[in-house]
Every structure is written in C-alpha cells, then in structure tokens.
Image (spheres, rainbow, N blue to C red):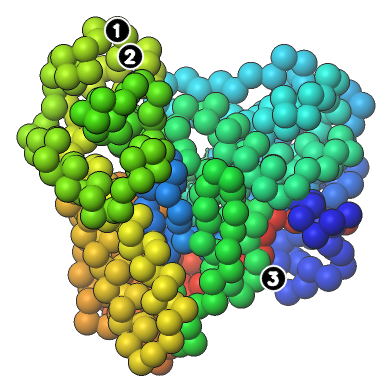
Amino acid sequence: MGTDDCSPVLKLSEVGGAQGDRFKALGQFFEKKYGQPPEFYVRAPGRVNLIGEHIDYCGYSVFPMAVQQDIVMAVRGVSKPTISLANMDPSYADFSCSTEKLSVERPSGSVPWSSYVLCGVLGVQEHCRLAALRGLQVAVSGSIPASSGLSSSSALVCAASLATLHANQVSLSKSEVAGVCAHAERYIGTEGGGMDQAICFLAKKGTAKLIEFNPLRAHDVQLPPGAVFVIANSLAEKNKAASSDYNCRVMECRLATQLLAKSRGLEWSKFRRLGDLQKELKLEFSEMVDMVRTVLHEQPYSKKEICSELGVTEQQLDEITLSENTRHIDQFLPYQRALHVFSEAGRVFAFRSVCESGGEDVLSRMGQLMNESHASCRDQYECSHELLDTICRIAEGVAYGARLTGAGWGGCTVALVPGDRVDEYISKLKTEFYARRPTAEGLDLDTVVFRTEPGDGAAIYM
Ligand code: ADP
Ligand code: NG1
Ligand code: MG
C-alpha cells in the first residue's frame, strides 16, 4: 500500500485517552444496535480554513488545516443489500435504504443527515463502477459542531466514502478520493469547490496546507513558532444546503466571469470560474481588479440586465449558468464578489510567503492579512454575521488578527493569538461574549472556544 493510499489502516489499540473511550462507547452503541460488533472504524476530521474564503470554487488556492474534532464511524459490511445508519446523537434519526438504486434525497429547506452519508457512498459506487454494493451497518459519533464552518458535512461525506471503499475492498489515492467526495457532496445541491474534502484526506499532523486545485495538490506550510490559532464559535448555525445563499455567491462569481469574458470577446459560456478566465487572459491579480472596475458596475445587476449584456434569454441563462436554487434570484453583485475573490486569492499567497519568510513581525503580518480577509468577507462578499463581527472586534485588543472561517453567515471565527495570551483571549471571550449569549447557557465553553493545532487526515482503524 503506497503512502498516498486514501485508507491507511491504523491500529485501534493505539487510540488512547478520551478518543479511545469514544471509540469504545461507539463500538458498544453499534453492538447494541446491530447485535454484533463493528468490523472497522473510520475517522474523518473537520477543518479550519486559515485564509482563502469562498475562492476554492473559483479555482484559487486555499490554506486550511485539519482540526481534532471529527466524525467517527463504526462500520460492518453485510451481505444483505441494505445501508443502515444510526447516530449516537439522538437528534439524528435512524435511517435505512436499499443499496440498489441509491439516490440522495434533498427536500428543499432541510436536508436529512443520511443524504450526506449517501453522497459518499454513491460517489464511490459511481467512480469505482461497483455494480453490486455491499450492505453497510454504520454508527456515527460526531464532535464537529454542525453548521458552523468547520466542515462537519464534508467529514461525514468523506467518512462514508472511506467506509464504502474499505467494505468493498477498493482503494484509491488520497487526491482521487478527495475529488470523488468533492463531486459527490454536490449531490446535496451546494456547488462547493473541494477544499473541505481535500484537506480531510490530505491533512498531516503539525502542518497547515496550501491546497491547489486542477490538478489537486497540497503543499506543507510550516506555521511560524508562536503561532497559536484559537477557534471561537458564534453559536449562530448556518446549514449551507438549506438556503440559496451559498450557491448565490458561486453564481455571482460565475456571472462575473462570464460578463468579463464577454467584454474580452471570448466565448463567454465556456468560462465558469474566475481563475480559468485569469489563466486564459494571462493577467496579474491587479490587472483583473482593474478589469472588474472598468467593465462591471457597482450597482446591483438585475437578471434582465445580465441577460441583455450576455445576449441570452432568462431561460437560456438558467440553463447555461445558474443552479436550480438560484434561478429565482433577481439581484446579483458580480462587481463586489469578484473584487473579494481577487483580493482574497492574493492574500493566500501573501500569507504563505509571510509564513515562510521568518522575521520579527511575521505573526502581526499574518494577523493583518486575516483581518483584511474578514473585512472583505463582511463588506464585499456579505457572508459574515453580526456575531462573527462582534467576536473579531473583541479579538482586536489581544489577537494579531481574526476572521470568520468556512462559508460564514454564522459559525466559527479563527484568531491568531500570541502564545502567552491565549488564556487571556479565551477568558475575554467568555466574559465579553459568551456570558451575554443566551445560546451559550449550559454549554461546556471549552468545546465552543478552544486552541487548535494542525491534525491528521482521514484514516481507517482496526
Ligand atoms: P458545516 O459543514 O459548516 O458544518 P453544513 O451546513 O455544510 O455545515 O453541514 C451541516 C450538516 O451536516 C448538518 O445539518 C447535518 O445534516 C450534517 N452533520 C453534521 N454533523 C453531524 C453528525 N454528528 N451526525 C450526523 N450528521 C451531521
Ligand atoms: P463549509 O462552511 O464547511 O460548509 C463551504 C464549502 C467550501 C468553501 C467554503 C468557503 C462545501 C462542502 N464547502 O464550507 O468548499 O467554499 O464554504 O470558503 O461546499
Ligand atoms: Mg459543509
């Protein structure tokens, strides 16, 4: 088995401490549910994106690392052609379906958790052309706060894909299975870019990763000594599949791409991502920004105006460009969204160079880039939330910088904090933020605001 194999098999007996207890409890839960012990376990981590938000689906590189929080699945392959799911969290109901003609249910407004699991199963089945899928009994234990920007959804999809691969005795490379999962999670309806699934498989303990797309590549980036990242959850949840907000941003970037391509006399319908257009035009970020400022206007575009600029009917635009859940939208801001994307894509490379440059002010320069990223997400991309802005403001006096992480509209922030001020930052948030939030009452605050270190990627345990 090569080092790039997506399913390293690790020893269950070496999982110790609280994590070991969790595996044991999950095994017992499984046995009680299905009457026999699991054959193997799968662990898939969540992630925190340090910088590079809402640019993966435009083809630009991002800068995430895996967190300790994860999805763990206890699994047994069975001959009966049924997939059975149970969850240790009773708010996620049991589910079962036949392995024949799998389909991902996504009723509008609320997507069941089983659909994320089925994305992973179906993705593997289609990619590996498995005509007859083995049945699966699965029990899940999750410690990633859901709908909070730490990628619980992709951890579930990735864990399910690994479980399916292992139970059916197939193996893929890490990059390949990451691509399969990125594609498969789109069955949920969100048109994500692949960052979450990539880091879930490619993460390595002790290092953050610069992830490049097309082709997928991950570069280790050593974080400078003294860099401590602290995650703080705003406790405002945002399920990305339950609204059109996420896809609306993807479409606004696609529309910006097509309007800019048209202005250059290109066959605009062939371009869907700002990154592809930039490659075609061979321009620098600053030149792309100039083009946005001269070609697009700041005022919102109506769908009618976009159609007339592109020379198509609304029905044609729906078919060529828009996703199902964004066809009803009549106001798009391609100017602001494109400006965010080009500046944010530039900040990712700046962040990496600063990280690697050494020097005394490395941490404050990284913090500055994180602050700029947050401001751009808030003002140009409009994907922040007042509680995220509040946390970032509280961070100002203590942290080098802070920003929202993940898709936003709620969820978590990540702050770069001086090593000797981590306790001060956490207790400041406890008194100035959480003590005033009714949603924090009764919660164990150590699971809501905590320091984090780059963790390992997905693995199988036996
Ligand atoms: P994020 O990826 O930022 O956490 P998403 O909105 O993309 O948020 O995905 C959240 C969804 O993932 C939840 O609504 C739920 O369906 C699923 N999910 C997350 N954690 C678990 C878990 N422990 N068990 C079952 N489903 C989960
Ligand atoms: P979260 O918040 O984890 O659901 C989403 C996308 C990423 C990326 C970020 C924003 C999926 C599965 N994940 O993350 O691809 O676009 O938002 O940077 O769609
Ligand atoms: Mg998600």
User: Is 332 left, or right, of 190 in this rendering?
Assistant: left
**Residue that numbered label 1 is attached to:** 315
Examine the image and state in which quarter residue 240 appears.
top left
Residue density around tag 3, few if under 14, some if 14–19, many if 20 or more, within 10 Å:
few
Distance between the alpha carbons at the discs numbered 1 and 2: 5 Å
Name the residue rendered at 23%, 55% in the picture. Answer: 286
Asked if marks 1 and 3 touch (Cβ < 8 Å), the reply is no
**Residue that numbered label 2 is attached to:** 318
103 and 129: which one is in front? 129
Asked if marks 1 and 2 touch (Cβ < 8 Å), the reply is yes
Distance between the alpha carbons at the discs numbered 1 and 3: 55 Å
Residue type pointed to by label 3: Ala
Name the residue rendered at 58%, 33% in the picture. Answer: 183
Residue density around tag 2, few if under 14, some if 14–19, many if 20 or more, within 10 Å:
some
Quarter holding the N terminus is bottom right
Give residue 18's mark.
Answer: 3
- Precedes in sequence: disc 2 or disc 3: 3
Viewer can see residue 359: yes
Name the residue rendered at 92%, 26% in the picture. Answer: 79
Distance between the alpha carbons at the discs numbered 2 and 3: 50 Å
Residue type pointed to by label 1: Gln
Task: Residue 375: give x, y in percent of width and height.
Answer: 21, 60
Task: Residue 209: give x, y in percent of width and height.
Answer: 54, 64
